[in-house]
Amino acid sequence: MITNYSDTVIRNLTLDPENWTEMRELGHQMIDDIMDHLEQIREQPSWRIMPDDAKLFLKKPVPQKPEDIKQIYQEFKQYILPYNKGNIHPRFFAWVQGTGTPLGVLAEMLAAAMNPNVAIGEHAAMYVELQVIDWCKQMLNYPAEASGILLSGASMANVTALTVARDHQLRLSIRQKGLRKVEPELVLYCSAETHSCVQKAVELIGLGTESIRKIGVDEDYKIRTDALIAAIEKDLSEGFTPFCIVGNAGTVNTGAIDPMDDLLAISKKYSLWLHIDGAFGALAKLVPEYEAQLKSIEQADSLAFDLHKWMYMPYEIACVLIRNAAAHRNSFAITPSYLEPETRGLAGGPEPFNNYGPELSRGFKSLKVWMSLKEHGLEKYAAMIRQNIAQAFYFGDLVQKEGQLELLTPVTLNIVCYRYTREGLTDESLNKINKEILIRLQEQGIASPSSTVLQGKYAIRVAITNQRSRQSDFDLLIIETLRIGNELSL
Ligand SMILES: *Cc1c(COP(=O)(O)O)cnc(C)c1O
């Protein structure tokens, strides 16, 4: 090495501000602005079309020179903040997305300030994370000895669980030999209404879509258990190796909850791993009216659910719980010399989280959960979830009372699928009209439902995991759907 660094070393470059007062003042300003924004979000349109100048502004070459932080913040306020997705808005009902909370915002700020890498070591964030995982078990009455890990979303939670399910079936040989050398052809069962991330998970763990048996559903969009048993029997007789059933606690289309007691009994009978995708619906277990229906998920081999949906935490956070902690560890534990734990010092502490999932570096996701659960208490969350369910039933009733609206599936949880109708119109033209109604609802900033197609019928789909929605928001959505529908079919 011939480079001479000495001139650089004495400059003591850093990314910390030269002027801390200016940074502190900007921070105060941001907190004031963001609290105003959240407090007044109801007065804002639910969504705005992002203009070309804002998009152009975001196509610049990488900055080489410093820019003023106040100016950067102005640009954020001008080009980014107004064109938010809007899931913090009281009339956001698209897909299944949570709203977050003001304390959640602050907790994220504190977590970023501490900025610990929550993989290994003796430091507080490791213990907060363990506390939150324990709280997750307690919330759903899952066994205390189970293991768990916090992940970015239910998609990753499902991948993690299905990896363990696969490895447990194939024992450890899978980690040494990989799938190519493994004999049995594993097959997995789930309903046709299962979220696409389960298929992605099966692809990622190397089994391929041909190993998925998508079982038909009944008129309530729940898995048909007779068809499930028939499929398992057929696979067994043809030499396949059934290894896993994925049950839905709340399907994404309609909120259907698969018959959990039956799935548990079938998984036991055939010695299959029972995994539950409870992305949002698992949390309905906190609501007395749903407790019994979801009781059996306590006995599932693994359980995946989001905290950024029906626990209203800021993105991203989900949890997977695995009954057999040793199996969980067997799938992921690996200890190279540079991660060797100690009994004392910074490398002491609880077992590294990277032994329980695919990631090494991990942010401090759990702080917002820890603070928020303390802020409101679990009873309040149960009441909020119950309110969202009540709102879905209320909205479903409103739809049924209107001659020009049609409820496309019975409401069973927090999702309502409906459409505008008019006598004499075919499904094809109704599909066109309803698609246009949905887009205008969004573009006019009134409300943001999403869509799905149910038995060939285009449905406006309202999914409620929103802690800001009020009864009047649903009244308005009815009025506006009718207004736009009537305008369109003139
Ligand atoms: C949202 C959702 C998922 C995916 O969860 P992410 O947090 O988006 O990764 C999986 N299953 C169901 C039923 C969902 O609603």
Image (tube, rainbow, N blue to C red):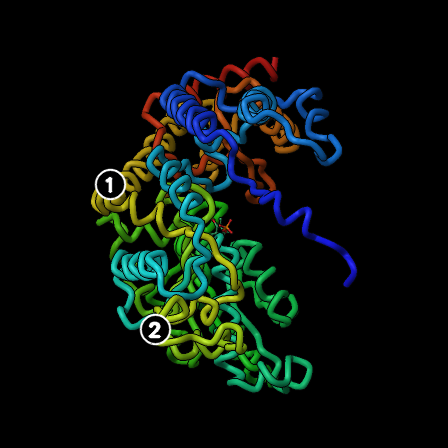
User: In this rendering, does residue 436 appear at all?
Assistant: yes
Left or right side of 285 for 335: right
Q: How many marks?
A: 2
Quadrant of the image containing the N terminus: bottom right
Q: Could you say which disc has been placed on residue 375 in the image?
A: 1
Quadrant of the image containing the C terminus: top right
**Label 2 crowd bin: few (<14), some (14–19), many (20+), radius 10 Å:** few
Q: Depth check: 268 or 379 in front?
A: 379
Q: Is residue 77 above or below residue 180?
A: above
Q: Earlier in the sequence, mark 2 or mark 1?
A: 2
Q: Could you say which disc has been placed on residue 344 in the image?
A: 2
Q: Depth check: 298 or 20 in front?
A: 20
* Disc 2 to disc 1: CB gap under 8 Å: no
Report the amino acid beneath label 1: Glu
Q: Is residue 124 above or below residue 342?
A: above
Q: Image point 68% across, 29% down: which residue?
A: 58
Left or right side of 111 for 95: right
Residue at disc 2, CB closer than 8 Å to ligand 1: no
User: In this rendering, does residue 89 appear at all?
Assistant: no
The percent position of residue 296, horizontal first and vertical second, equals 31, 65
